[in-house]
Image: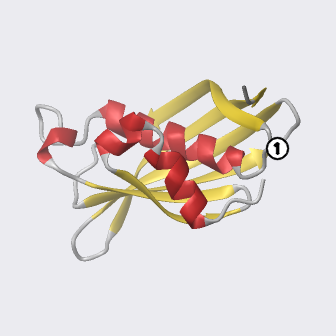
Amino acid sequence: MNIDLDTLRGFFRSAPFMVDLGVEPVAVRQGRVTTELLLAPRHLQHTGVVHAGVLASLADHSMGAAAQTMTPAGHWILTAEFKTNLLRGARGDKLVCEAWVLKPGRQIMFTEAEVYAVMVDGQRQLCVKASGTMAVTQAN
């Protein structure tokens, strides 16, 4: 499926939880998606770092979107399994997630993602490394 940035933004807008979090796609090409999330106090846990659920959700949805770019028309991607390695607490002004398809397939795809915390000066720090197995399903 050939997906441009406007189409990808439409996919993200149709996912209420991603809208609620504030996740925005900023780049797309076949098998690769980059997303951003401007951080707000609601994204933090009690110690002041970004909640692990926010980080995992950002990585999961971005990996699924990367797989969707390689999916035939009439099919959707659903997460079958994913693993999130939290490397350090995320602090900063925004998160950037880079997600890609490691191995495409007709029924399943293997994906990876990295989530970076970005400071106001643009300095990035890797906070999450994730991997996911995405199922290719028939659209209803």
Q: Residues within 10 Å of mark 1 (few under 14, many from 20)?
A: some
Of 128 and 53, nearer the camera is 53
Asked if residue 86 shows in the view, the reply is no
Residue 100: horizontal and vertical position, in percent? 66, 52
Quadrant in the picture for residue 37: bottom left
Question: Farthest residue toward the bottom?
Answer: 121
Question: Farthest residue toward the front?
Answer: 140
Q: Could you tell me which residue is drawn at 63 percent across and 33 percent down?
A: 132
Quadrant in the picture for residue 30: bottom right
Residue 115: horizontal and vertical position, in percent? 44, 51
Task: Find numbered disc 1 in the image and state the secondary structure of the residue it sits on.
Answer: loop
Residue 78: horizontal and vertical position, in percent? 65, 29
In the shown orientation, is residue 113 left or right of residue 3?
left
* Colour pattern: secondary structure
Q: Could you tell me which residue is drawn at 75 percent across and 47 percent down?
A: 102
In the shown orientation, is residue 79 left or right of residue 122?
right
In the shown orientation, is residue 92 left or right of residue 126?
left
Quadrant in which the C terminus is drawn: top right
Q: Could you tell me which residue is drawn at 68 percent across and 34 percent down?
A: 77
Question: Farthest residue toward the right?
Answer: 106
Asked if residue 14 shows in the view, the reply is yes
Q: What residue would you read off at disc 1?
A: 104
Residue 56: horizontal and vertical position, in percent? 43, 35
The total number of labels drawn is: 1
Of 4 and 90, nearer the camera is 4
> What is the three-letter code of the residue carrying label 1?
Pro
